[in-house]
Amino acid sequence: MKTKLLSISVLMAVTAVPLAVHAEYSVTDEIRVLQGFQAGGGSDALAQLAHPYLREILGVNFINEYIPGATGAIAWTRLSHQSPKDGTVISITNTPMLMTNYIINDSISYNIDQLTPIANVVTDPGVVVVHPDSPYQTIEDLLAAAEETPGRITIGNSGIGGDDYFSTIMVENASGLSFEKVPFAGDGPSATAAMGGQIDASFNNVGIVYGHLQADSLRALAVLSAERLPMLPDVPTLREIGYDVVNGSSRGYSAPAGIPDQARDELIAAFEELATNEEFLQRAEERAFYIDIVTGDDYMEMMKNMEETFSNIWDELDEDA
Amino acid sequence: MDSSMLMAGIANVLSWSNLLLIIGGTLLGMFVGAMPGLSATMALALLLPVTFSMEPGAGLSMLASLYLGASYGGSISAILLNTPGTPSAAATVLDGYPLSQQGKAGKALGVSLFASFCGGLMSGIALLVAAPLLGIVVLKFGPIELFAVAVLGITIIGSLSQGSVVSGLLSGGIGLLVSTVGMDLITGTPRMTFGHMNLFSGISFTVALIGLFSIPQALLLIEKSGQGKKKVANKITDRLMPLWADIKTLMPNIGRSGLIGIITGLIPGTGGDTASWFAYNEAKRFAKDKSRFGKGDLAGLSAPESANNAVVGGALIPTIALGIPGSSSTAILLGALMVHGILPGPNLLTEHGEVTYTLIWAVIIANFALLGVGLMFTRMCVAVTKVPDGFVACAIIVLCIVGSFAINNSFFDVGLMFAFGLFGYWMLKAGMAPAPMVVGLILGPVMETSYQQSMLIGGGSFMVFAKSPIALCLLILALFSVLQATPLLGIMRQRFGKRSTHSG
């Protein structure tokens, strides 16, 4: 570990010099990053991984400010309503949580039009996991069981408004089946309940359960990505069996709306450069981060698509209720 | 268990640099723990970034020893200031403070240190021996079993109300009510938030705890500071080393409490705060003379202290064996593992065995560091007692503000803390104990969420609880715990007794 760290720091020292000359951030030498979750969580892990490289690219320091609460909504409200619109303050934006927060809850006052999306960085694809001794060998088995006993197959998710909750509904809508959706306080407890056999399956995320899949304490039935994942080559996608459900939990960076174009362009360029940094990509892979860099307008489009999908789903649910 | 990793782990821990980190971590933990409002979780969160650049083993050793140090440190201010330094020391106040008022602060701190040491060491050894085995048991605790645990916990409320049972139940009821504030987990509906975003995630019980315990204390100090010269922060006038005779009589109690701590730590979602109340309650139940509790009983002091340190090792068992944090503090340790590129889960014991066993050994060694550092450092706390009441009161309020702000970096929480503080002051004047309210706050969400989940899993039938042997046992235990406090049991016994004499 020590030698690895040493070699990394040597590499950084070598690469830092030319980069620092080419791309200085014109706005400030200190960027504040609002984080809507506790230090040590998944968003923080991304920050700890990406910031050293971004620091080299932009020549600025990153200062993390943790404002946990209301599943990130406090931090994002502050970003959109109360932060200087000059490129000195950005925030880690978790999708679809960023949108589902205000779709579900009328008292949350921000929306994505009040943001300047900079770049998505990682996407943790959804995955359906079961107990290793579960009678369901394939995803088809699970769906067949749901057809036999409608609403009695228990599916864990990470909580109302989370990506896994909506994934379950998307599968329900696509297949016409119904499950008993059991919300937990996060991905971890939902995976644990599947491991303990308290629920039939858990809709989870690959990054969370990868260790358990490796250790055979959980078994994956399907992934919710567009194509099969290189780390789980034997697990089919839902698309393969005829359900067009692609979902996951993504994390990226956004600034408030109305920041100067130059600041926006420089930030976007930094993330595009990050996407080509071999060392960063390798470090991300070591931590089972599934890098998915989408910048600028494309990131906005990604958010818009999610917003539409999830608000449609929620409106339908509201009508049913 | 791979013995080569076991040995590599101990070799790592016994290097000079790691020993220094462990001692430093323990000292820092004690200092932070002694400050009211700064919890072990918070201290861990603050130190975490510092360990990023360290070797994984070294960083984790330091974090673990800090956790352990803070678990003891919380008792220092509990005993001397009547203010729990950490949430898990709230139960320590009940008997610790009366002892220091009787001029036995040294004895109280010594016993607390020794109980912490025993609890911590027990859990360290349990961790080493049982981590690979006990991991399996943890998985048996799903929502259904967790609900039963919470119900059993709630029955503690009755025995915590000093004086009037009714006011205790009222206090507990308010706690349960306040715990329902926030987003409902099952429906996503915000409840009692008045559209205020800061209340969506509910009221952090740490914020409530700081307010309820510390602010009334500070206000009392200010009240008194004008009139008398009586110090509220008590001096250590007697010897710190506990007497062998005391230790001998306390040993069964410390052992039982340690066991409670390990088991409570083992169950995900419950930590030192819950364990210390459990242990206190059990100590009281087992005691021959219950009247001395709350007035400075050494058993009532050593039980929560042994338990809250035993939680450290207990909570690390599911963390290490399964990647499931057993408490909020181990959740941060888990975060630390991930920062070092180590994925949580069962492979912690195989692939990353060397780092994991370094951590386990560090927990054991840190207990000895705690005993040594504690004996030296605790005396320095006398300095706190030489400060005039008014200053102490101001210092407490400042620490309360810093502490409640630091949890979520939120000024709203500071306001909330003051609101709880004023309410706590009123409770104090009205003779209502704050402890049941805190128990309600802690266990309320656990009970509610796990109940709703159980209902979803069981298809809305109560039979789901009867089908789980663990849940059934716990619920029956809870029933007895309630009956024991009512005259019903006495009547039944009398009737039964009479009938048997008639027939016999």
Image (cartoon, coloured by chain):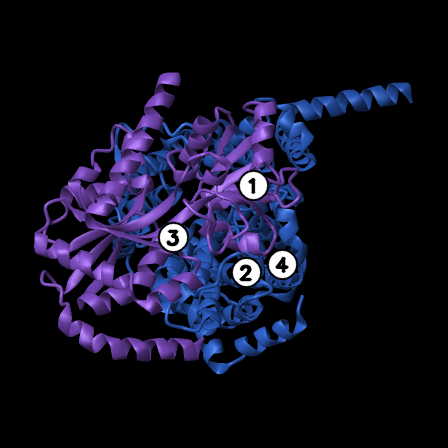
Residue B48 image-quadrant placement:
bottom left
Residue at mark 4:
B131
Comes first in the chain, label 3 or label 1: 3
Nearer to us in this view, A235 or B274: A235
Viewport quadrant of the N terminus of chain B? bottom right
Residue at mark 1:
A193
Name the residue type under label 2: Ser
The reply to whether callout 3 and callout 1 are in contact (CB within 8 Å) is no
Q: Can you see residue B397? A: no
Q: Colour of chain B?
A: blue
Task: Give the CA distance from mark 3 to mark 4.
Answer: 25 Å
Chain of residue at mark 3? A
Circle 3 residues within 10 Å: few <14, some 14–19, many ≥20? some
Q: Is residue B255 left or right of residue B16?
A: right
Task: Give the CA distance from mark 2 to mark 4.
Answer: 21 Å
Name the residue: 86% across, 22% down: B500
Residue at mark 2:
B116
Task: Give the CA distance from mark 3 to mark 2.
Answer: 33 Å
**Where is residue B249 drawn, in percent x and y?**
67, 57
Question: Which label number is shown at residue A42?
Answer: 3
Same chain for labels 3 and 2? Say yes or no. Answer: no
Name the residue type under label 1: Ala
**Where is residue B46 drawn, in percent x and y?**
34, 60
Name the residue: 21% across, 41% down: A77
Nearer to us in this view, B257 or A17: A17
Circle 1 residues within 10 Å: few <14, some 14–19, many ≥20? many
Q: Colour of chain A?
A: purple
Nearer to us in this view, A25 or B80: A25
Task: Give the CA distance from mark 1 to mark 4.
Answer: 19 Å
Same chain for labels 3 and 1? Say yes or no. Answer: yes
**Where is residue A5 drawn, in percent x and y?**
39, 75
